[in-house]
Image (spheres, coloured by chain):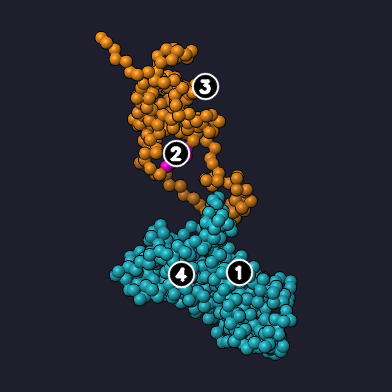
Amino acid sequence: MGVIVKKVELGWLDRTYVWPVAKGMAITFGHFIRQLLTPTARRFTIQYPDMKREVAPGYRGLHELKRFEGGAIKCVACFMCAEACPARCITIEAEEFGDLNAHQGFEEKRPKVFRIDMLRCIYCGMCEEACPKDAIWLRNDYEVADYDRLSLNFGKWDLMNTYASADGKAVITQDPTPAVPRRTIAV
Amino acid sequence: MDSFARLLHLSPPLAWMALKLLIVIGGVMGIAAVLTWVERRGAAMMQDRIGPNRAGVKGITLLGLVQLAADGIKFFLKEDVVPPHGNRLLFTLAPALAFVPAMLGFAVIPFGQSFSSGGQAYHLSLLDPGNGMGMLYPLAIGSMAVYGILVASWSSNNKWAILGGMRSGANMVSYELGMSLAVISIFMAAGNSPVGSPVTLEAYDPHRIVEAQEGLWFAVRQPLGFLVFFTCMFAETNRLPFDFAEGESEIVAGFHTEYSSMKFALLQLSEYIHIVTASALLVTLYLGGWRIPFVPNPGVLLSVAAFLAKLLFLCWVFVWVRWTIPRFRYDQLMFLGWKVMLPLSMANLLLQAWLMHGRGIA
Ligand code: SF4
Ligand code: SF4
């Protein structure tokens, strides 16, 4: 491998060392003054707890499980997201619920348990891509931290309510329709 | 002012001395402490950062000045590690050895215009003029500071430390020469006080040197000498670009690798005190001491303010240079010291001598 060595010919002024130092000092002083005169809000540093970074559209942050207006979960427990997830951090248990409604017809599936282990999730957005119902998506909350591991194992209701206050929606903790007991199918 | 004068006449000379001591020690320590803050905030600003501004009591951060108190408390509470195979006595002594000479240099610096009150002359320097040591004293004491560093490095029994100490010693030896020659041309230019002035001062007395800068500062009259002395002061204080005694990227932290807790804080503080003393020397020798341009007799308060302003500005320049210029390599430093600074300073000496000869002085 050849290395290109650039020989820089310095003029006599640059070789005095004093002049380049003066130039350098002018540069640092310029930065100093500029930083001093820039108001805090416009500086490069985002002073985190007081100021927050504005994330770009399409940012992949904390997930939300979407719901219909009535409060019913959109997810149909198809397991596509769990299958697509490269970190294998989604756990779903399905259940059936009986209700005749315009959206899903009669006797539909929904998750009884929907857990995402936030410590394993890599926020790749594959679950969002895979979902046929657009029931899960990643939004822009990046402050996912807690004091113990268990609290970061987000369950179904955590995921449905992650953005409830940001969107001004009601926090729900119950499905609007009860689940039907699992039927044993006689063969 | 009147009541102050009455107080001066009533009190014994010892009280006046004590007051001066209080002012000087308090002032130097205060400036050194604030300088650590200036260095960190200044560095941050120059690098488009913000710097320490979060430490505070109930949200009062005073622009980050509370950080100083936080650091002090932290240093006190830290474990004080003494390397087991080092020399315990010297290891403990070294920070003091570095600290004291840095402080002592200030003793002869006139930090304001002398004034007379009630037929008695009062001089604003710890030692009155005509003490026979003059400017030679801070120079001699200043070279003592390297002992602190050498002892610190030797007693640590650490390879990084001894490398740092060796570098520092070599640094000091190489730059002391050029510096001294530059100062000699100052002494030449200052000359003895003319016969018939109230006190006859030797050429090397700082008061005489300030007196001699009445018309033009020595920085203007001897720009070459100023440049040499200025550069050597950076070497003397072990600051960037000559801070290779600590050179983090090469030898961990150099001479204070093994230091922790308050000992480390003292070493660090002595560096800043050294900066203050070096700035004071520069101000006295080259920037006219307490003089204000075009004001022949500024008076006590104004002269002290002028001295302080110049001092603080130079301290700021020390910080400014630190965040501009990268560290020299060892051989580059030696090259600069022996082949550039020494000849330059000799040339300056000869030039000044020739000029004086041309003007018919001596
Ligand atoms: S973002 Fe990626 S890692 Fe996280 S749950 Fe979705 S698919 Fe899994
Ligand atoms: S979130 Fe979407 S992909 Fe995952 S189980 Fe529910 S419907 Fe299927």
Q: Amino acid at mark 3?
A: Glu
Specify whether A125 is left or right of B179.
left
Mark 1 or 3, which is nearer the eye?
A: 3
The residue lying toward the viewer, choosing from A18 and B214, is B214
Disc with the residue nearer the chain's start (2 vs 3): 3
The residue range painted magenta reads A142-146
Residue placed at 40% from the left, 75% from the top?
A: B93
Chain with cyan colouring = B
Identify the disc placed on residue A148.
none
- What residue is shown with label 3? A69
- Chain letter of mark 1 equals B
Chain A, hue in figure: orange
Q: Nearest the camera: B339 or A139?
A: A139
Q: Measuring 44% from the left and 20% from the top, which residue is drawn there?
A: A177
User: For the residue carrying disc 3, how many other residues have a C-alpha within 10 Å: few (<14), some (14-19), or many (20+)?
Assistant: few
Instruction: Check disc 4 and report the residue beneath it.
Output: B266
Q: Is the residue marked 2 within 8 Å of ligand 1, measured from its CB? A: no
Q: Is residue B209 visible in the rendered structure shown here?
A: no
